[in-house]
Amino acid sequence: MSFTDDLDKQVGDYFRATVAEHQMTVLHEQDLYRHIRFAKPGTGLCHFDLVTWPGYLTISGDLEAYTFRRLTDMFEFFAGDRQINPVYWSEKLCNDHGRRGVLEFHEDLFRETVLDHVKDHEDEYPGLAAALQEQVFDEDCSFEQDARHWLEQFEHNGFKFSDVWDWEFTYYSHSFLYACYAIQHGVNAYRASKLAVAAS
């Protein structure tokens, strides 16, 4: 499993564990003007609110707040049981940074990317993996600038990395992925409650 798939799964599992005892409360509902809260009764821990108005949806609460814009009814945009789509959804964010604002450096992704790059060169450069471990991975690579520095300085028997500046070591933040799961969960729970009422 790739780093990105593994992280998505980890955040999804964590989200489902944190909301297992949540209940939905409709605080306001008038056409597309909604304020829906999801929380465990008696505590605000891990609670979140979904607020909509025509063309917009905001998620806030015990997590970082995000506002999206796409369809007139944003519940339609996020509804369904399909896999969350952070790439597409981030493009609908209403802030100055857009998609870049929810990306962050991940050291594990850095390591995975570098190892993928060198795996086809180990026969030509014996000891390459060990040298990489010593010169790069054993150094402090917890910050992107430092990680790129060690990668650019790396040399083993004539092997050097090129065009490192163009390599991507960022992926979506835990907080944004968590919000994506929360929005989809909240929208589906709200729509399910409406169907239950209509069927009764």
Image: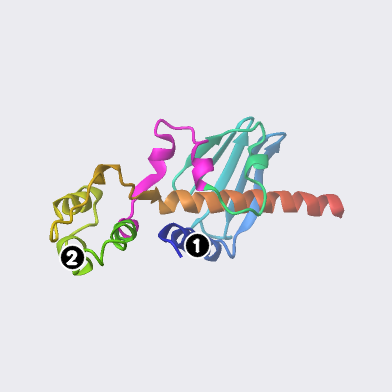
What is the three-letter code of the residue carrying label 2?
Asp
- Outermost residue toward the front in this view: 124
Residue 138 tag number: 2
Q: Position of residue 187 (x, y in %)?
A: 65, 48
Q: Are marks 2 and 1 in contact (CB under 8 Å)?
A: no
Circle 1 residue: 9
Q: Is residue 92 magenta?
A: yes
Colouring of the image: rainbow
Disc ID at residue 154: none
Neighbour class for label 2 at 10 Å: few (<14), some, many (≥20)? few
Residue 106 rendering spot, x and y as whole percentages: 33, 55
Marks 2, 1: nearer the viewer: 2
Give the residues drawn in magenta, as a range.
86-110
- In the rendered image, is residue 169 in sight? yes
Task: For marks 2 and 1, give the CA distance.
Answer: 27 Å
Q: Earlier in the sequence, mark 2 or mark 1?
A: 1
Q: In the picture provided, is 32 more to the left or to the right than 93? A: right
Residue at x 49% of width, y 48% of height: 61
Residue appearing at x 58%, y 44% in the figure: 50
Image quarter for residue 42?
Answer: bottom right
